[in-house]
Image (cartoon, grey):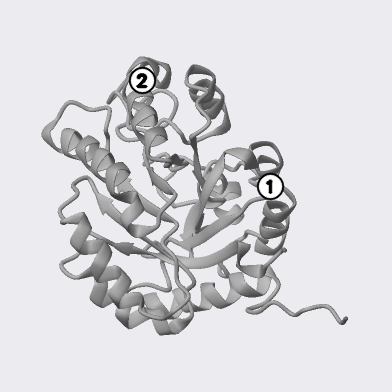
């Protein structure tokens, strides 16, 4: 039976923070339907304990943990890179404690080199991680953020546009490797995100709720390489994306999972307005999904 909650609307939480469970306890009443705990570069928690604390914080609320995040450069050779790789391994091994199906983050990259030169390391590292995840019934998803890199150079991630996805999945066509997709990072490239859903949705394992506003007046006057920013990352509901179309295309493509809001980027709804913006995004995305509740058809 189809259900509105085939696609849940949730939010990301900083798992590196001193007490992630306290944060969840404070926000769970706002109506979030899922949470994505994520780590930045280092996995600094006892995962068994964290899973228990998060379950206790969620309590009786209908909130799931679909995806865990581990963001860093697991292809690098520095100490923090090795910590990121160890974090991926630990989350893969402990995903079942959270009820999570997916671990997501950056692919990593050979720093300062053209994108293609990262492919051998990508195949080596992610081939092994993919096998480890497959043994545990876990999927691995790559966020589509460039992290200020491009085709010629970068520090964090190669999975930032469709040409790179073609290379990655041709080199390593494993079924449990996919994408953590969001329209924001494509708008930053001036790419229309909509056709991607129809082509790439089978590889969408998780979706981030983040948007962007392209400032076309700046583009026309100053271009995209000047001192004036031509694009702003936005919370859903404040940017250019038609989320009704996005969610409709996701449904048509058979997507089942979460759209977790990635906050802390909006230039307006930030700091003391952060949760105001996130709850507005939550309400907006639920409306674009068809509402907050399933309405049964008449008998």
State how far apart marks 1 and 2 are (Cα): 28 Å
Mark 1 closeness class: few <14, some 14–19, many ≥20 residues within 10 Å: some
Residue at point 34%, 58% (across, down): 98
Image coordinates of residue 12 in percent, x first then y, are 38, 63
Is residue 79 at all visible to an observer of this figure? yes
Comparing 104 with 148, the one in front is 104
Comparing 262 with 90, the one in front is 90
Image coordinates of residue 168 in percent, x first then y, are 48, 24
Give the mark, 1 or 2, whose residue is nearer the N terminus.
2
Residue at point 55%, 56% (across, down): 257
Residue wearing tag 1: 194
Residue wearing tag 2: 118
Image coordinates of residue 138 in percent, x first then y, are 42, 42
33 vs 129, left or right, is right
Query: In this rendering, is residue 252 above or below 178?
Result: below
Query: In this rendering, is residue 281 above or below 207?
Result: below
Comparing 251 with 232, the one in front is 251
Is residue 16 at all visible to an observer of this figure? no
| SS at mark 1 in the image | helix
Query: In this rendering, is residue 284 above or below 43?
Result: below
253 vs 229, left or right, is right
Residue extending farthest to the left is: 79
Residue extending farthest to the right is: 299
Mark 2 closeness class: few <14, some 14–19, many ≥20 residues within 10 Å: some
Quadrant including the N terminus: bottom right
151 vs 95, left or right, is right
Residue extending farthest to the bottom is: 29
Quadrant including the C terminus: bottom right
| SS at mark 2 in the image | helix
Quadrant position of residue 201: top right
Image coordinates of residue 84 in percent, x first then y, are 22, 39
């Amino acid at each position: 039976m189809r259900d509105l909650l085939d696609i849940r609307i949730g939010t990301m939480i900083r798992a590196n923070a001193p007490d992630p469970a306290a944060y969840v306890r404070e926000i769970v009443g706002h109506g979030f339907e899922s949470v994505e705990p994520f780590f930045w570069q280092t996995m600094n928690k006892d995962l068994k304990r964290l899973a228990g604390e998060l379950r206790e914080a969620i309590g009786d609320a209908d909130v799931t943990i679909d995806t865990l995040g581990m963001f860093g450069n697991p292809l690098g050779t520095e100490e923090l890179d090795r910590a990121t790789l160890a974090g991926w391994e630990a989350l893969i091994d402990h995903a079942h404690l959270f009820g999570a199906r997916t671990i997501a983050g950056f692919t990593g990259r050979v720093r300062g080199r053209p994108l293609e030169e990262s492919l051998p390391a990508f195949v080596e590292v992610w081939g092994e991680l993919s096998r480890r995840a497959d043994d545990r019934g876990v999927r691995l998803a790559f966020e589509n953020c460039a992290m200020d890199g491009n085709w010629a150079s970068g520090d964090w991630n190669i999975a930032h546009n469709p040409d790179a996805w073609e290379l990655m999945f041709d080199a390593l066509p494993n079924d449990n490797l996919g994408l953590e997709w969001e329209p924001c990072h494509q708008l930053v490239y001036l790419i229309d995100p909509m056709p991607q859903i129809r082509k790439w949705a089978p590889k969408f394992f998780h979706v981030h709720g983040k948007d962007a506003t392209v400032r076309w007046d700046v583009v026309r006057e100053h271009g995209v390489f000047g001192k004036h920013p031509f694009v702003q990352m936005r919370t859903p509901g404040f940017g250019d994306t038609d989320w009704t179309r996005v969610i409709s295309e996701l449904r048509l493509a058979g997507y089942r999972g979460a759209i977790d809001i990635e906050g802390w980027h909006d230039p307006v709804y930030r700091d003391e307005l952060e949760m105001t913006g996130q709850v507005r995004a939550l309400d907006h995305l639920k409306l674009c999904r068809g509402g907050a509740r399933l309405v049964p058809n008449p008998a």
